[in-house]
Image (cartoon, rainbow, N blue to C red):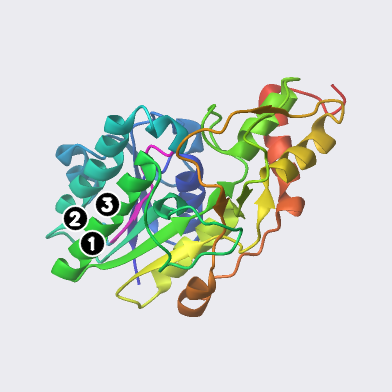
Amino acid sequence: MYKRALVTGGAGFIGSHLARALLQEGLEVVILDDLSTGKIENVPDGAEFVPGDVRQEKDVSKVLAHVDIVFHEAARVSIRSSINAFYDDAHVNLMGTINLLRCCAGTDVRKIVFASSMAVYADCPSPTPVSEDYATEPISPYGISKLASEKYCIQFSQNTGIHCHVLRYFNTYGAGQTFTPYVGVITIFTNNLLGKKPPVIFGDGRQQRDFVHVGDIVAANILAMKSDILRGIFNLGTGISTSVNRIAELLCDRIDPDIRPLYDSVKPGELRYSIADVSHAAEELGYQAKFKLEDRIDEVIEYYRRRKGVSPDA
């Protein structure tokens, strides 16, 4: 099996959870992160942290010694901000991936697990789960950069024989996500409400998403690591659709029932319906989402409540 893993972006939300799980699996773990959004306190005990930029050959090359599996999590992950910052988005997401691939050539690396996104898909006309062969016509620069990166990863695998698993994450939530105005509707709404501000819904709120807990995403990465499949592309979600209105309702009721959401105009680049058909991941990887949104949303609230120092009765 594998002995030493590199996790790019391992000081970030998903990357740090994944690094912790890999350590529990008995692997040595090295993390490469430029701390642009990740935080040093997220790095788990036992992992080796190396500051660096995934776009820089010297930074990547120096952390690949004796690494036999790579989990590529480093990315700019905002669909909304990618509209105006499309150059920076492509530079990090696409060129960072390409640089990582060229650095892996000729090393001990035997498998690459690439974190992709549901943003690679075209919008769906109804809240129907989409499979991996659904049309890939991204409506955001972020989705374009992820789709192009996928294609480079698969072609690199074909040319080198290095195994490659592309994992298309749907809307991932959980404790530890960095709060920004652009990423993670549950995180954004929670922080607004704890600050006595109403959540702002862009559009009518009837848009539907597949909210998957970070624990399920991490479990899928471990399954991908253990899989004997040479290469593949897999949706990671729950198959359950939840409207943005429902998310606002859940959070308002739990945090401050006196606050109700405000509505604003639709933002460009965001899918109206995005729900995963996970049957392929179930059949090939043994993946099954275990966590339910209604059961896990309180942990997100409590995490940000502690960080903000807000008492439950405030």
* Tag shown at residue 148: 3
Vertical order, 35 against 171 (above or below): above
Query: Left or right: 188 with respect to 230?
Result: right
Q: Which residues are magenta?
A: 69-77
Vertical order, 24 against 205 (above or below): below
Local secondary structure at mark 2: helix
Q: Is residue 78 visible?
A: no
Q: Kindly indicate whether the residue at mark 2 contacts the one at mark 1 (C-beta within 8 angstroms).
A: yes
* Tag shown at residue 104: 2
User: Which corner quadrant of the image does residue 35 belong to?
Assistant: top left
Q: Kindly indicate whether the residue at mark 3 contacts the one at mark 2 (C-beta within 8 angstroms).
A: no
Q: Position of residue 157 (x, y in %)?
A: 21, 66
Q: Quadrant of the C terminus?
A: top right
Mark 1, residue position? 109
Q: Position of residue 231 (x, y in %)?
A: 31, 71
Q: Position of residue 311 (x, y in %)?
A: 81, 25
Which residue is found at the position 32% from the left and 53% from the top? Answer: 147
Nearer the observer, 42 or 159: 159
Tag 2: amino acid = Cys
Mark 2–mark 3 Cα distance, whole angstroms, equals 18 Å
Tag 1: amino acid = Val
Nearer the observer, 207 or 298: 207
Query: Left or right: 303 with respect to 142?
Result: right
Local secondary structure at mark 3: helix
